[in-house]
Structures are given as structure tokens and as C-alpha cells.
Image (cartoon, rainbow, N blue to C red):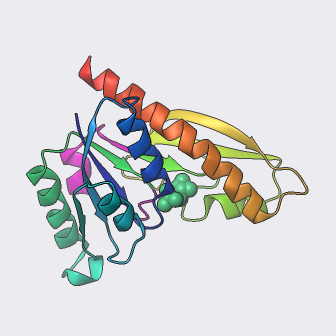
């Protein structure tokens, strides 16, 4: 199975997915890393692991549709079968959704439907809830609204700083996402 990972920033989850592929936990190949920023650290991770990588930015295109058409072409050229979003901070548009129905999954750092959007960890922290977590879900046309595949809760202690909570969330993500990706790949192959 040919995977593409789409990311915007650091790429610690991309790194966790690479490890899981390398040890055979995920029976698939990462054939493309795409970043929507030329200076995203995730590109260095791809380079270090000899994974083909491409970056382009929305502002280089006339509009969002043209950007997405270029992305779609890139994915088609690489014969991608499953798209894994790992810190990709953009809404997926109609053309991609149609071309990859039920083949785009996302990781979100909160227990959806609570705290959707760009700042899931901070929003939960500021809301002073006692529990938040991590969600893996299929993408649909809404913002963090697609069918949920897996969730794991994370307690927020009253002594936790935002940085400590971020660390706890990332630790859970790095375990949960590779495990769920492995299950989905096996399911598709069945
Ligand atoms: C992760 O916490 C992921 O859940 C979040 O971005 C972070 C990326 O970290 N995604 C979203 O907030 C999507 N709305 P990473 O670049 O180190 O993998």
C-alpha cells in the first residue's frame, strides 16, 4: 500500500509513522511527504529517511482550487492509495475529497467533537476541563467533523502547564496514530 503523508510543521507524528513502517508494524510504504511550507521541519525528516518529498505553498497559486489541483496531480503521479494527515493545517477541498473518498485520515489533538480547529490542545487547556485527548478520524467536508475511528483520553491535572499537556498529548499521538494507521491499511488490504 502506497501512503502519502501531508504535514505543515514539525513532523513528530510523521517520525513516529516512519518508525512503525520501518519495524513492519504498518505494512505499507511512505512514497511521498508533502508539506505546504518550504521551511517546515518535517521536510528534513523526510530527507533524513530517504523519503521522497515535495513542498509548495498556497500563495504560489492563483487560488485554493489551483493549489489543490496541483496537490491532486502530485498524489496521482505517486499512485497514492491512502492519505495520512499529520499536522496538516489546511482544510481538504472537494476535489481531493472526491478523489480519495474514505482514504484520507486525520489526527486531532482533542476528543472530538470537543475543541476542533487549529488549537485543540490550548483550547482544552484554557477551558479548564479535566480531560482531553486524541482523535483519529476520516476527513469529510467539515472542520474536524468526519467519522471517528479511534480516540484516547488524556487527563489534565490542575498542576499541568500547557507545555506539559502538549507533551502528554504528543506521547499519546505517537502511539495511537501508527497503531490505527496499521489497522486501516490491513482493513483496506483485506
Ligand atoms: C499534532 O498534535 C496534531 O494532532 C495536530 O498538529 C500536531 C502536529 O505535530 N493537528 C491538528 O491540530 C489538526 N487540526 P507534529 O508536526 O509534531 O506531528
Rendered-image quadrant of the N terminus = top left
Q: Is residue 29 above or below residue 97?
A: above
Task: Report the side of 164 relative to 190 (left or right).
Answer: right
Q: Which residues are magenta?
A: 87-105
Q: Quadrant of residue 159?
A: bottom right
- The outermost residue toward the top is 190
| Residue 10 counted in the magenta span | no
Rendered-image quadrant of the C terminus = top left
Is residue 148 visible in this depiction of the protein? Answer: no
| Foreground pick, 9 / 71 | 9
Percent of width and height locating residue 105:
39, 43
| Foreground pick, 33 / 88 | 33
Is residue 5 visible in this depiction of the protein? Answer: yes
| Residue 103 counted in the magenta span | yes
Residue occupying image coordinates x 20% and y 80%: 61
- The outermost residue toward the right is 159
Residue occupying image coordinates x 57% and y 45%: 173
Residue occupying image coordinates x 28% and y 76%: 57
Task: Report the side of 162 relative to 81 (left or right).
Answer: right
Amino acid at each position: 500500500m502506497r501512503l502519502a503523508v501531508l504535514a505543515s510543521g514539525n513532523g513528530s507524528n510523521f517520525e513516529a509513522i516512519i518508525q512503525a513502517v520501518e519495524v513492519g508494524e504498518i505494512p505499507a510504504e511512505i512514497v511521498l511527504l508533502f508539506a505546504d511550507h518550504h521551511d517546515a521541519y518535517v521536510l528534513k525528516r523526510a530527507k533524513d529517511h530517504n523519503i521522497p518529498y515535495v513542498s509548495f505553498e498556497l500563495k504560489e497559486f492563483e487560488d485554493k482550487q489551483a493549489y489543490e489541483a496541483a496537490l491532486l496531480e502530485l498524489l496521482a503521479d505517486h499512485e497514492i492509495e491512502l492519505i495520512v494527515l499529520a499536522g496538516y493545517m489546511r482544510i481538504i477541498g472537494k476535489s481531493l475529497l472526491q478523489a480519495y473518498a474514505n482514504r484520507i485520515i486525520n489526527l486531532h489533538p482533542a476528543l472530538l467533537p470537543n475543541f476542533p480547529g487549529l488549537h485543540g490542545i490550548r483550547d482544552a487547556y484554557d477551558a479548564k476541563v479535566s480531560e482531553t485527548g486524541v482523535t483519529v478520524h476520516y476527513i469529510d467536508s467539515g472542520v474536524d467533523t468526519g467519522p471517528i475511528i479511534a480516540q484516547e483520553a488524556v487527563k489534565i491535572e490542575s498542576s499541568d502547564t500547557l507545555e506539559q499537556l502538549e507533551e502528554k498529548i504528543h506521547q499519546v499521538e505517537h502511539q495511537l496514530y501508527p497503531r490505527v494507521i496499521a489497522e486501516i491499511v490491513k482493513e483496506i488490504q483485506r
